[in-house]
Amino acid sequence: MTRFIMPAILILIAIALFFMFTNPIYSDIGTLKETVTSYNEALDNSKALENARDSLTAKENAINPDNLVKIQKLLPDNVDNIRLILEIEQIAGPYGMILKDVKYNTTNPVASTPSVVSGGAGQVTSGDYGIFDLEFSTTGSYNNFINFTKDLESNLRIVDISSISFASDTNAAGNANVKTPSSEVYTYDFKIKTYYLKN
């Protein structure tokens, strides 16, 4: 009888030791394996991202620096409204057309509420780029207006003309019945859109 009791006690002790010590250790090992697996996946993803970054960097380095400057001007990574206005003034300058009543707003791509500077309308699209609206007035002859508009549309930076309204410049025209060069001067109100990449 005694020789049956001792093995039974040892078996019970072994079972108790298994549940008290061995089983928790196995559980810990399983948890550690899962952690190691997740770390390995993160490491693989990190390597994939590094490879993608290196590939993109190599492609960028292969582009002619002059073309990179043109791309930056074509679709800048910020609004850069002052530079845009200066560019338009430079285009209008040869035709003697001076920008007046400039209205615009500055929109931060990550902000939910645009900060209005002076009238105008601005917006941020839901895609990867934002839209910047600009309004201005200028005066000049019809021929100069046509040439200025063509130059504006062919400028490297993407510019869409939303609307143009014009009226006779009465201050320059004087008596409308008298046909003089000054009577051909008009005031033009432009509304344009340009685009920029969101950060």
Image (cartoon, rainbow, N blue to C red):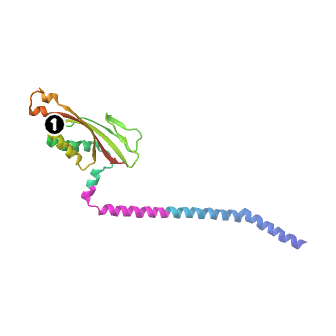
The image quadrant where one finds the N terminus is bottom right
State the image coordinates of residue 198 (x, y, percent, origin top left): 37, 48
State the image coordinates of residue 35 (x, y, percent, origin top left): 57, 61
* Residue bearing the label numbered 1: 140
Q: Is residue 185 above or below residue 198?
A: above
Residue depicted at 18% across the width and 37% down the height? 98
Q: Quadrant of residue 106?
A: top left
**Residue 142 or residue 116, whichever sits in front:** 142
**Residue 186 or residue 14, whichever sits in front:** 186
Asked whether 53 falls inside the magenta stretch, the response is: yes
| 123 relative position to 48: left or right | left
Please report the bounds of the magenta region as a residue range.
43-68
State the image coordinates of residue 122 (x, y, percent, origin top left): 34, 39
What residue type is disc 1 on?
Gly
Disc 1 crowd rating (10 Å Cα; few below 14, some 14-19, many 20+) is many
Q: Quadrant of residue 170?
A: top left
Residue depicted at 18% across the width and 40% down the height? 145
Residue depicted at 19% across the width and 44% down the height? 91
| 107 relative position to 137: left or right | right
State the image coordinates of residue 26 (x, y, percent, origin top left): 67, 65
Residue at the far right: name it: 1
Q: Quadrant of residue 60?
A: bottom left
Residue depicted at 16% across the width and 42% down the height? 93
The main secondary structure of the magenta stretch is helix
